[in-house]
């Protein structure tokens, strides 16, 4: 047998395939954007998001539905973090999703400085129910901005002989795009987060149907949307400086969340989860594919 069908080569490929299955099962929107990535980076980004998805499932319902207490969920999450850091150091894990992430991390220069904040934010979900401005920013950094930074590391380093740090402007763009994505999802999921999970990430408070006058928190939806749009526009200005094989996918993702921000602004306070129709998603992807500039969020 050749090295392609045995040993570490086969194991690496199987781990990458497992990560791709996780992503296709959990996110059609992400799957669409990922297909626009060049083959140099596509498997790496899938590897990152698969680990993120598994960790998120531990704290967002699946583990609890399986009968795990909050303390047990914390132990599982802690074990996953330890296993991930060990695999990044050693280059191998018996957990296929962790192994896939570790191989990406080693090739692209993703270290503990990004892994640890991510798990710290996931751990916060087990015992923090209401966030103020400071804890919101810390949570968003760990849960979303560092994920953007992990992806950026793959954009600039995949296939390189030695990983190098990204330009500070690209770092700022990646962080702001991740923050915008997270805040959009917070607004979309607000009724579920507050009503079912008992979490208020934004300080907006409870919402009901109506025009927005029923907000009870210290932050208004308009303020959050203004922040989102500023982050989206700042990130959009940096996308043309990304490697060519990444721009279309990042533009498509950026424009999808721009469309969601616009729909959230029009919808006001509602219990219905705002969505972008599949036809619109495909149109945004087609627009990005031909090299169109990222949409302006405020227009």
Image: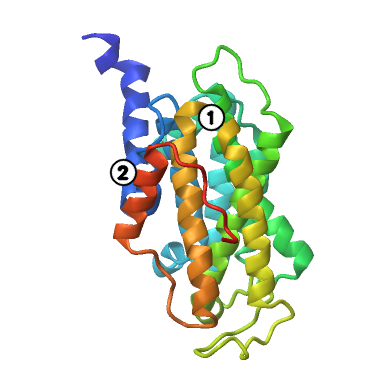
Q: Residue 137: x, y in percent?
A: 72, 59
Q: Is residue 290 left or right of residue 151?
A: left
User: Residue 76 in the image: x percent, y percent?
Assistant: 52, 53
Q: In which quarter of the image is residue 241?
A: top right
Q: Mark 2 points at which residue?
A: 21
Name the image quarter holding the C terminus: bottom right
Is 234 located above or below residue 217 in the figure?
above
The foreground one among 259 and 195 is 259
Determine whether the residue tagged by mark 1 lies in a helix, strand or loop.
helix
For the image, the number of numbered tags is 2
Horizontally, is 4 left or right of 118 in the view?
left
- 36 up-or-down from 90: above or below: below
State which tag comes first along the sequence, 2 or 1.
2
For the point 54% across and 82% down, which residue is it?
269
Q: How far apart are marks 2 and 1 (CA)?
A: 20 Å
Residue at the (75%, 70%) spot, across then down:
132
Q: Which of 294 and 204 is in front in this view?
A: 294
Query: Nearest the camera: 206 or 17?
Result: 206
Residue 106, label in figure: none
Residue at image coords 59%, 45%:
236
Q: Most extreme residue toward the top, as rendered?
A: 2
Q: Nearer the viewer, residue 159 or 121?
A: 159
Q: Where is residue 266 in the image (x, y as percent from the top left)?
A: 51, 76
Quarter of the picture holding the N terminus: top left
Q: Is residue 291 visible?
A: yes
Residue behind mark 1: 154
Residue farthest along the front direction in this orientation: 299
Instruction: Name which quarter of the figure residue 167 lies in.
Output: top right
Q: What element carries label 2?
A: helix
Which residue is at 65% across, 21% downward? Answer: 164
């Amino acid at each position: 047998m050749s090295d392609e069908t045995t040993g570490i080569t086969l194991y690496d490929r199987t781990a990458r395939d497992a990560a791709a299955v996780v992503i296709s099962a959990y996110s059609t929107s992400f799957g669409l954007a990922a297909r626009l990535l060049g083959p140099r980076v596509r498997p790496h980004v899938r590897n990152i998001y698969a680990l993120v998805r598994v960790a998120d499932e531990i704290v967002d319902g699946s583990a609890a539905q399986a009968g795990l207490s909050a303390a047990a969920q914390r132990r599982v999450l802690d074990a996953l973090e330890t296993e991930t850091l060990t695999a990044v150091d050693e280059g191998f894990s018996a957990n296929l999703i962790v192994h896939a992430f570790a191989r990406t991390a080693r090739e692209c220069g993703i270290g503990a400085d990004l892994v640890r904040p991510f798990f710290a934010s996931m751990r916060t979900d087990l015992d923090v129910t209401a966030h103020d401005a400071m804890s919101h920013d810390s949570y968003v950094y760990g849960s979303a901005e560092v994920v953007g930074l992990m992806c950026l590391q793959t954009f600039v380093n995949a296939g390189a002989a030695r990983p190098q740090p990204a330009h500070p402007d690209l770092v700022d763009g990646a962080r702001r795009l991740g923050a915008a994505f997270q805040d959009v999802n917070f607004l979309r999921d607000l009724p579920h987060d507050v009503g079912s999970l008992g979490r208020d990430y934004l300080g907006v408070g409870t919402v009901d149907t109506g025009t927005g006058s029923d907000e009870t928190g210290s932050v208004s939806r308009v303020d959050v949307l203004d922040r989102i749009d500023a982050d989206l526009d700042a990130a959009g200005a940096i996308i043309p400086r990304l490697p060519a094989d990444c721009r279309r996918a990042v533009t498509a993702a950026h424009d999808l969340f721009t469309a969601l921000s616009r729909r959230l602004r029009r919808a006001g306070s509602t219990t219905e989860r705002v969505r972008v129709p599949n036809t619109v998603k495909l149109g945004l992807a087609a627009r990005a594919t031909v090299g169109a500039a990222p949409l302006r969020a405020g227009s």
